Image (cartoon, grey):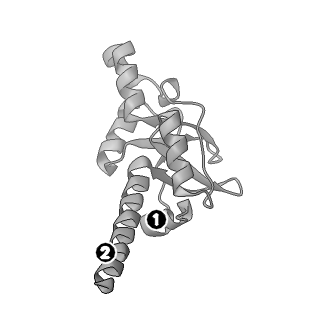
Amino acid sequence: MMKIADILDNKGSTVHTVLPWLTVAEVVERLGRHGIGAVLVCDENHAIQGIVSERDIVRALRKHGAQLLTMPVSEVMTRYVQTAGPDETVAHAMARMTAGRYRHLPVLEHGKLVGMVSIGDLVKHRVREMELETGVLRDALISRY
C-alpha cells in the first residue's frame, strides 16, 4: 500500500506558508511565482490558521470585487483545514479529498508540518502504480505463452 510518506519522499517536503495579515494581492503574487494552487496560512509560531487556494480567491473576488486585493488573506482563507499523517494510505487520502471536495492536504507528524500533497500528486502516484501493475501482468502473460 502506497503511503503519503512515499509521495513526500519523491516530491519533497516544501510547504509554502503565509502570515494571516498579508494581503490577498501578496498571496496571489506568491501563488503565481511558485506555480502553486494553495498556501497554508500560519501564525508566527507556525501553527496552521487556515489555507487559501485559487478557488477561495475566485469566490471572494466575486463577492468583494477589486477591493479583495487589499484585504488580509485571513478574510478569505478556509479556516477548517483537513490534515493527514505520513502513514495514511494514498487511497484513503484520495477518498477523503474527493468526498470533502478539497485539493490540498497538509501532512503533520507528531503535530509538526512535514509536507503537503495535492490531489494531483496522489493521482500521479496512483497512475504510476497502475502502470507498474499493468506491466507486471503483461510480462507474466507474455512469459506464459
Q: Residue furthest front?
A: 145
Amino acid at pointer 2:
Arg
Examine the rendering and report whether any part of residue 26 can be seen.
no
The residue carrying mark 1 is 12
Q: Nearer the viewer, residue 51 or 66?
A: 51
Q: Residue furthest right?
A: 110
Give the percent coordinates (x, y) of residue 99: 52, 36
Q: Nearer the viewer, residue 40 or 143?
A: 143
**Residue 64, above or below 49:** above
Q: Quadrant of the N terminus?
A: bottom right
Numbered mark located on residue 70 in the image: none
Examine the rendering and report whether any part of residue 84 can be seen.
yes
Give the percent coordinates (x, y) of residue 17: 49, 46
Q: Nearer the viewer, residue 12 or 125?
A: 125
> Which residue is depicted at the point 49% across and 69% down?
9
Numbered mark located on residue 138 in the image: 2
Q: Are marks 1 and 2 in contact (CB under 8 Å)?
A: no
Q: Quadrant of residue 54?
A: top left
Give the percent coordinates (x, y) of residue 89: 57, 57
Q: Measure how far apart labels 1 and 2 are at the Cα level.
A: 32 Å
> Which residue is depicted at the point 30% across and 43% down?
32
Amino acid at pointer 1:
Gly
